[in-house]
Image (cartoon, grey):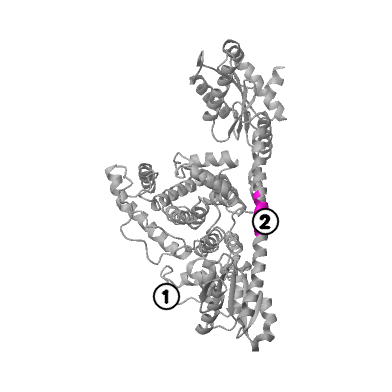
Amino acid sequence: MIPTTFEELRLTGRLPSPPGVGLRILKITQREDCSAQEIGEAIMADAALTGTLLRIANSAMSGGVRPITTVAEATMRLGVRTVRNVGLGLSLVSAYRIGKCERFDYDRYWSVSLARAVAAQRISEKLRYSAPAEAYVVGLLSDIGRLALATVYPTEFSTLLASCDTHDQSALRVSERERFEIDHGEIGSYLLEEWGLPQVYSQAVTTYENPPQINVASNGELALVTNILRFAALFANVCTASSADPRIPWSRYIEELEVMRITLRLEPGAFFEFLNGITREWLEWGKVMHVPTPTPADFAKIAELAQRATVPDPSTAIVADQPAPTDAPKSHVPAGADGHVASGDRRGLRILAVDDDPMSLKLLERHLVRAGHHVQCASDGNEALQIALDTNPQVVVADWMMPSLDGIELCKALRRIESGRDMFFLLLTGRGEEDRIVEAFDAGVDDYVVKPFIPKLLIARIKGGQRVIELKEKVERDRQTMMNQVAELGLLTRKLRTAAMTDMLTELPNRRHAMRRLEQEWEASVRQDKPLSVIMIDIDHFKQVNDSHGHDVGDVVLKETANTLRNTTRQGEDTARLGGEEFIVVCANTNLDQGMACAERIRAAVESHTIQCGTFHKNVTISLGVAQRGPGTTSVSELIKSADEAVYLAKDAGRNVVRAAVPPSARSKSA
């Protein structure tokens, strides 16, 4: 069951999602019977993606020799999974390359995500996982929850990042839950489920950042995928780490790399060459995805440090000696949050002028610049398309008749892309083409000017487009304001709900939460025919503590006992305070024997914990009763009553013990 918190995030309408083409490719490739033709048809809806795939298919990466000219041929040469990875990666990166969360480093996020994806695929091959291409996708998306928080709550998440050590994922997730009632791991898990990825991947996304190391040999596919993601994240963190950052936990990284080496069963030399090979592949993928790849760490030098068992000083050069490739793609970073140029006339538009005639293009540029606009130029449609994808102009002024990709085809290509749909497109057309102007409007053109153009008329048409653009921007600002209000209202609602479900003294969930949780687990237990147990807990002689030392000390005893319960219980064991000195633990998918073991673990932990407060300096003990849902247990209230009766059995046995409830069938026989 999806928690309400994620439902509320979904209602904001701002959760990250692969744009249309990327999501369609992802859905198609999840089917075993998907064909190259289906994928090709999906890809051809995006001109930029089509061009990128053809370049890859004809590059050294593909190992091909015959020129590829169609998407279907590119798909057959590269393979369905590679095409899927390129399509999904490019669509996500282009859609979320920049954002409004000030402290969130978008370039680094995608650089690390890409490194994790490439590493996940190669590590999965080493561990002989059956779906290495799927590991790439999960590696790319495993940290999507952080992007979601930066997108839905840009201001609040930026403030949180400013106050947290982002290298400590556990602490970051605790802070996220305190602030948003949900953490990035949970969000990522639910998003992967929504996009139709197998459940094992969504489960691994919530666990891979958590210690300790899982034994891949004995814990099935989930443990294997979790380890793949954990090792891939380790590679990405080390590979992209800055030697000048004093917060980098180098000693921990070196220890974890050794665990990774042993798990992969590689000798030190072969292991670090394996990592350097992943690094080279990451740099190649960075060029393909237009993701900046900083100068990577040199794993050979890290190997030397590991052999000497030393912790590297931040000043130690562990970065590769060679400079970053000069042709590495650079991301377009707008000067302001709104994307406008920081200097010059603020009223000026960002305009892309396109004409294959150099003199006409120069004249067009001169008049637009003189009118106060910021102009980029392209000499043909293909160049214009690439510039438009990189810089996102507000207006495109293009000649109709151009070789290769004419003005109409350029307009159609832009309208198929999310960012291109909002661009104001003005077409320059000769007098002999006026009869075909209806065709231009059908293609998505917003306005036209006849060549040779009259400068005043051209600028007047641009001003008309500017009014449309400003109106759209106002509508978008109003929509963003409304979405922010929805998000804030959802956050406030979750905080109020949490307060209503939390015991204010111990900060454990309260009775209302416990009953709701127990009802949910009861339904799941009945539906799936899985065991369910509850543990009732009562602090021994608590009234004497209040009478002898006062209620202030009694409150401390309750809080300390609650903390011990919180720290002792494990995943799937939900603890709550029922009231007074009574607590309950709901144990999902747990039979009576397992419940007894859990209760004994809790009892021993409480007994060994010394509480100090004023005149009180001693250990307290608890009595525990365990009951399991069985054939004779017909309701939640009966289950609780059975566990409560077991607590009385524990008290009669001298307290500080665990007792199991008598099954209803046994009671009826004895009667």
> Of marks 2 and 1, which one's residue comes earlier in the chain?
1
Instruction: Name the residue rendered at 65%, 41% in the picture.
Output: 492
Instruction: Name the residue rendered at 49%, 61% in the picture.
Output: 333
Image spot of residue 513 (x, y percent): 66, 32
Query: As rendered, which of 300 and 597 lies closer to the eye?
Result: 300
> Residue 196 colored magenta?
no
Query: As rendered, which of 508 and 377 lies closer to the eye?
Result: 377
**Overall secondary structure of the magenta stretch?**
helix
Q: Which residue is mark 1?
A: 65
Image spot of residue 69 (x, y percent): 51, 77
User: Looking at the rendering, which quadrant does residue 217 occupy?
Assistant: top left
What is the count of numbered marks?
A: 2
Q: Which residue is mark 2?
A: 479
Image spot of residue 530 (x, y percent): 63, 36
Q: Is residue 50 visible?
A: no
Crowding near the residue tagged with mark 1, few <14, some 14–19, many ≥20 C-alpha atoms within 10 Å: few
Which of pointers 2 and 1 indicates the residue nearer the eye? 2
Callout 1: helix, strand or loop?
loop
Image spot of residue 526 (x, y percent): 68, 37
Q: Identity of the amino acid at label 2?
A: Arg
Callout 2: helix, strand or loop?
helix
Residue furthest to the top: 548
349 up-or-down from 638: above or below? below
From which residue to which does the magenta span run?
475-484
- The quadrant the C terminus occupies is top right
